[in-house]
Image (cartoon, rainbow, N blue to C red):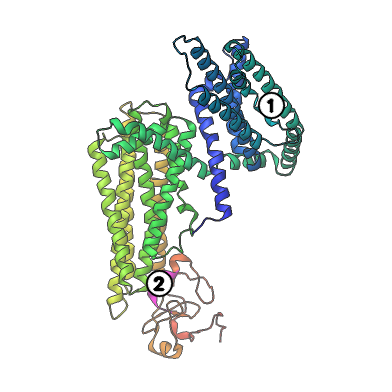
Amino acid sequence: MRPSRAQVEAAVGIIMRVPGLFIIDYWWQHDRNKSVPQSMSLQGVLNAVLTNLVLVHGFLLLLLPISRVRSLYTNFVSALLLLSSHLLSKYYIQMEESLAQDQHLDIDESFTRRQVAAFLAHVVLAWMVYELLDGPYRPLLPILSCYTLPVLARVFDFPWESLEVLHNFGNALMCVSVACYLYSQLPSLISFLKDAYLDTLLLTMRFGWIGLMTLFWNKLFVPTHFLVFWLIEFCVKLAEMYPTWESPWYLLVLSSASGVCSSPVTLVASSVTVSYLAYLILSGTKAFLHGSLSFLNDHPMHSGWTEGITMLLLALQTGLTEIKMPSRVAVLLIILFIVMSSLLQSVLEITEPVVLALSASQSRQVGRHVRTLGMCAFLVAFPLHITWRLASLFPIDFWMMIVLSSCILTSVQVVGLLVIYGLFVYDAWRTEPWEALDDVIYVARALTKVLEFLVAVFVVGMGFWESTTGKWNWANASILLVHCYFNVWQRMQAGWHSFLLRREAVRKTESLPEASAEQLLLHNDVCSICYSDMRAACVTKCQHLFHRTCLRKWLYIQDKCPLCHAHVSLETPGESEPGESEPSGSSEAPEPR
């Protein structure tokens, strides 16, 4: 299948813009200290100006429209070709001078071949520049071929001392030619700057400075550019380390990835790469569970950016770019394990609704059940294996305990999910409905939540214990506060609130009277909640009949009647008995007789 024109243009755009990231990264690692003049001498000021021009050139490659970027590359390549012609002419003159001064050569057999090769090289370089440059006053081919003058002089047997003079004359002609070309491009440059200023002014007036900064950010931060940039950097590091590497291959990969994380640009590129890898894993999980590719973009939180942002924040917090090798490898490994624990939680979020849907719908698709149970087995075994490996490789401190607790929680949650799955499957095999199913599921969920709460409390205790040993800083304190609020306080509050709602619903349903046989016969309808036949039911104040278990599940969510929305409260002995009025199957409240 041939790529479309749009795909080809997008690929060319990536190839043309990615060098801008290399320029910015190089400036940060090597030249950022030279951006300010080291002295007020002319050379110091010129070096600072050239250094800042290099940085501006990198940003221009990322911000300019693609047509302007193409023009920028054209001028840059033309300048390189002219510089190559200049250097070739200097080398030619030095070679001719050395051969002319050699008294042992009576006959120069390579003279003709040497002159023809030099002449053709200069003509080809001049023709390439002529074809690349554009404009109404672009330089003429004879002027661009001015470096052929020393070659022609040598062919016509001019003395070799005159070659340097002709070379300098060619330099002067080239400078005049370049100046004429730049002058011809000046109106176009002024027009572009004017249009850019007007566009910026209009955007600022319409969207404000925030909108303008957002536009610039969208231009600078293109994930595909950072991904390609990281892949090239990673391959370069891999090629540098591979010839002398003797350890296992995965350490080579980890060391190469750590070597890339040496500047803010490469750190952002590494985070983007982690986001892409997480997205591929999550998309593969969805395709594996559903058996198709139709559910890949149904949840924005499963796009992989959560894992990428997590890595970026942890790298900034630990100062990853400032750590020297090989210590950076160990820090990056811990960060990647934290990101992996977050990724496992995302995989669990994808797997849980599939497991519950399969068990509740009583699906007979054996292949889908096998795939789902296989994924659950992986989510139980793999986090435990990671926990064991980390505990054996690193000392257990507060940060490591957070990683280990996250892995253990994932396994605990999956075990609780499998228990609920088994209960639903058992209920599907029964010939009669299991009325106690909801209570058993609640107990299973409660036990899982209690285990999660205990693990969170243990991590908090580990943090407070470490604070007494002196190994403490503001980063640990902030993480501990966040952990206490989200994983301890909110879990405890949510669990207690759920318990109160359930207890209130049980009290209300137990206080409702049982429907008599006459009422069931007169009602002669199914339960309005589960649409099943009613052999036994309870009667609400509004004289509606429901299964007691179904009504209790309904009251977990809201305390109103499903049909007439009347408030369902606790029955007292002094209130009306169920035989005083007939039940109503309509959705309106019954009128008094």
- Going by the numbered disc 2, the residue's amino acid type is Thr
Residue 529 visible in this rendered orientation of the protein: yes
Label 2 belongs to which residue?
Answer: 509
Q: Is residue 82 above or below residue 48?
A: below
- Going by the numbered disc 1, the residue's amino acid type is Ile
Of helix, strand and loop, which one carries label 2? helix
Would you say the residues marked 1 and 2 are in contact, meaning their CB atoms lie under 8 Å apart? no
How many numbered badges does the structure rendering display? 2
Name the mark on residue 451. Answer: none
Nearer the viewer's eye, disc 1 or disc 2? 1
Q: Nearer the viewer, residue 417 or 269?
A: 269
Query: What residue is drawn where x is 38% and y is 33%?
Result: 237
Magenta span:
546-554
Q: Is residue 248 above or below residue 469?
A: below
Of helix, strand and loop, which one carries label 1? helix
Q: Nearer the viewer, residue 137 or 402?
A: 137
**Which corner quadrant of the image does residue 374 belong to?**
bottom left
The earlier-in-sequence mark between 1 and 2 is 1
Q: Position of residue 553 (x, y in %)?
A: 41, 69
Name the mark on residue 143. Answer: 1
Query: What residue is drawn where x is 69% and y is 26%?
Result: 143
Label 2 Cα crowd, 10 Å radius (few <14 / some 14-19 / many 20+): many
Query: What residue is drawn where x is 42% and y is 46%?
Result: 486
Q: Position of residue 105 (x, y in %)?
A: 46, 13
Residue 120 is one of the magenta-drawn residues: no
- Quarter of the image for the C terminus: give it: bottom right
Q: Is residue 329 above or below residue 548?
A: above
Q: Position of residue 411 (x, y in %)?
A: 29, 53
